[in-house]
Every structure is written in structure tokens, then in C-alpha cells.
């Protein structure tokens, strides 16, 4: 658990030092998705998106993974940090997709990931999870292939939909 906290603190310091260099616009998003990590989990949470221009975008998020492990319902907290990259200039159509590099961590595993995102709204990522110590979820070890499919809905869109 201490390694997870140390890693999270280091990641936060690096991210905040990058953010302190310039003024960034922040957007809030609600996320829903599916995660496969040796088990299937539904995901519900939120993310903050930070951008100065649309070439490099930073995201921080927190969510709850909910699913069944060894026939018992389980909920795990998840924190994640992503960087979205697209360096195409003055070409709107090619700017619709981004390369996504990031990492996610729960109280059971840490998983670096890579993938693609469409407009920053629809993510498809994959990675490999490394367990934290002997951490298990209802007796099930969560390591190996990690696949995520996530829909990010901006809160502005939700607000405008119900006006």
C-alpha cells in the first residue's frame, strides 16, 4: 500500500509541476465504461480534462470499478492519469483522434496503458496490470491483461441537454 501511495504522490507532483507552467482550461466529465482485469467490471466516475491547446491534453480521473470476483460483488476505487497526444496542425479531420498514454491504479494493482481516443470522448485502451504486494479481490489475483472501454461525457453537454 505504501508503494501505491508513493507512486501516486510522485505522479501528482510531476503532473502539478507541468500544470503550473501555463494557464490551462479545465473541463469536467462524467465517465461510464467497461474494464477487463482478470474479471469484468463496470466503471462509473469522473474526470478533469486540462488543456492549453488541443495538441496535448491532460486528464485526471477517479472512479469506482464494480463487478463480481469469485461470485461475490466487489467495488474498487480507481485513480487514473492520462496524456492525449495529437500533433497534426491545421487539419481538423485528423485532429479527431488522439494517442492516449496513461496509468491507472487501484488498491489492488497498478496498470500502465496505451490506446486511442476519439475527440477525447470515447477511449479504447489496453495495458498490463501489476499487483500491489499480495493484494487480492475476494481471493482473485488481479494481474495481467488490462482492457478499458470508456465513454467520457462532458458535464456541459449534460447541463445543456436538460435546459
Image (cartoon, grey):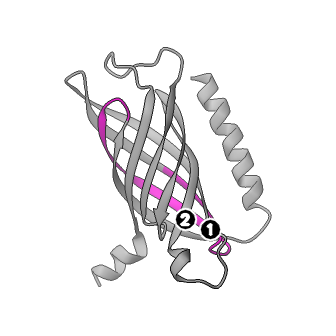
Question: Is residue 138 depicted above or below 88 in this figure?
Answer: above
Position of the C terminus, as image quadrant, is bottom left
Question: Is residue 42 depicted above or below 19 in this figure?
Answer: above
Q: Residue at x 45, y 28 (%)?
A: 144
Question: Is residue 5 depicted above or below 13 in this figure?
Answer: above
Q: Secondary structure at mark 2?
A: strand
Q: Are marks 1 and 2 in contact (CB under 8 Å)?
A: yes
Q: Position of residue 138 (x, y in %)?
A: 31, 19
Q: Residue at x 44, y 64 (%)?
A: 29
**The magenta segment:** 37-61
Q: Nearer the viewer, residue 107 or 92?
A: 92
Q: Position of residue 86 (x, y in %)?
A: 62, 68
Q: Position of residue 137 (x, y in %)?
A: 36, 22
Nearer-N-terminus badge (1/2): 1
The residue beneath circle 1 is 86
Q: Position of residue 28 (x, y in %)?
A: 48, 66
Amino acid at each position: 500500500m505504501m508503494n501505491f501511495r508513493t507512486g501516486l504522490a510522485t505522479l501528482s507532483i510531476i503532473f502539478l509541476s507541468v500544470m503550473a507552467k501555463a494557464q490551462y482550461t479545465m473541463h469536467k466529465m462524467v465517465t461510464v465504461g467497461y474494464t477487463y482485469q482478470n474479471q469484468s467490471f463496470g466503471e462509473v466516475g469522473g474526470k478533469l480534462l486540462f488543456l492549453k491547446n488541443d495538441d496535448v491534453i491532460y486528464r485526471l480521473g477517479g472512479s469506482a470499478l464494480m463487478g463480481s470476483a469469485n461470485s461475490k460483488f466487489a467495488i474498487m476505487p480507481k485513480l487514473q492519469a492520462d496524456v492525449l497526444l495529437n500533433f497534426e496542425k491545421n487539419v481538423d479531420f485528423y485532429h479527431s483522434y488522439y494517442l492516449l498514454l496513461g496509468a491507472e491504479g487501484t488498491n489492488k494493482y497498478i496498470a500502465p496503458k496505451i490506446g486511442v481516443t476519439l475527440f477525447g470522448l470515447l477511449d479504447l485502451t489496453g495495458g498490463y496490470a501489476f499487483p500491489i504486494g499480495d493484494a487480492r479481490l475476494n481471493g482473485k489475483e488481479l494481474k495481467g491483461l488490462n482492457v478499458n472501454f470508456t465513454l467520457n461525457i462532458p458535464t456541459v453537454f449534460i447541463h445543456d441537454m436538460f435546459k
